[in-house]
Image (spheres, rainbow, N blue to C red):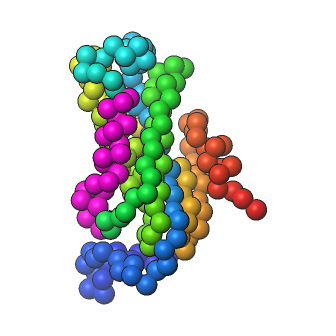
Amino acid sequence: MELTHFNKAGRARMVDVSAKDDTQREAVAEGRVKMLPATLALIKAGAIGKGDVLGVAQVAGVMAAKQTWQLIPMCHPLLLTGIDLGFSLDEEASAVNIVATVRTTGKTGVEMEALTAASVAALTIYDMAKAVDRGMVVEYIRLAAKSGGKSGNYVRGDHDQEDNSAREHHRSMYERP
């Protein structure tokens, strides 16, 4: 596989995508914030002093996806057509699971936008709850699935032993005959 973000002199460049066709594209990223059970209970009860943790994290994730091109040097500014974040409370793991879905119709994919949305949502959860639990761990920021474009579809396989709550949902969305 050729790395395309380098010019002939070996210096970084932003890839020219002008010759590529516009296609519908979607990327799904996920992450998790592990915390003390008491912290998760406070989030569930809406009792964190800073306010609605998941509501603020959702807005932060949406805002972050829209700003990805300003944060990641070689990302193109994209017209995003949809951004959604979902959260699930996993009491067994004492964690908040995050799923970020980003869509566009364009010449380049939205994987980085989805990853940025999940990352910033996780960091926002940490920020909102750090007064009660500085030991929280942001983990498993990863691409779960993507569709569209020349490289086609991708669904994350079993690369690790952790339970992937969104895997089956994404597999059914992208593995079509």
Find residue 62 and report its horizontal and vertical position in percent: 35, 45
What secondary structure is the stretch in magenta mostly built from? helix
Write the residue at 56% across / 43% down: 160
* Span of residues in magenta: 54-75
x, y percent for residue 3 = 41, 75
User: 131 above or below 113?
Assistant: above
Image quadrant in which you'd find residue 177: bottom right
Q: Is residue 10 visible?
A: yes
Residue 162 in which image quadrant: top right
Q: Indicate the quadrant where residue 133 lies.
A: top left
Residue 166 location (% of width, % of height): 58, 40
Identity of the residue drawn at 28% across and 54% down: 67
| Residue 24 in magenta stretch | no
Up/down of 55 relative to 81, above or below: above
Q: Is residue 69 inside the magenta stretch?
A: yes
Q: Nearer the viewer, residue 1 or 149?
A: 149
Residue extending farthest to the right is 177
The x, y position of residue 111, in whole percent, is 44, 58
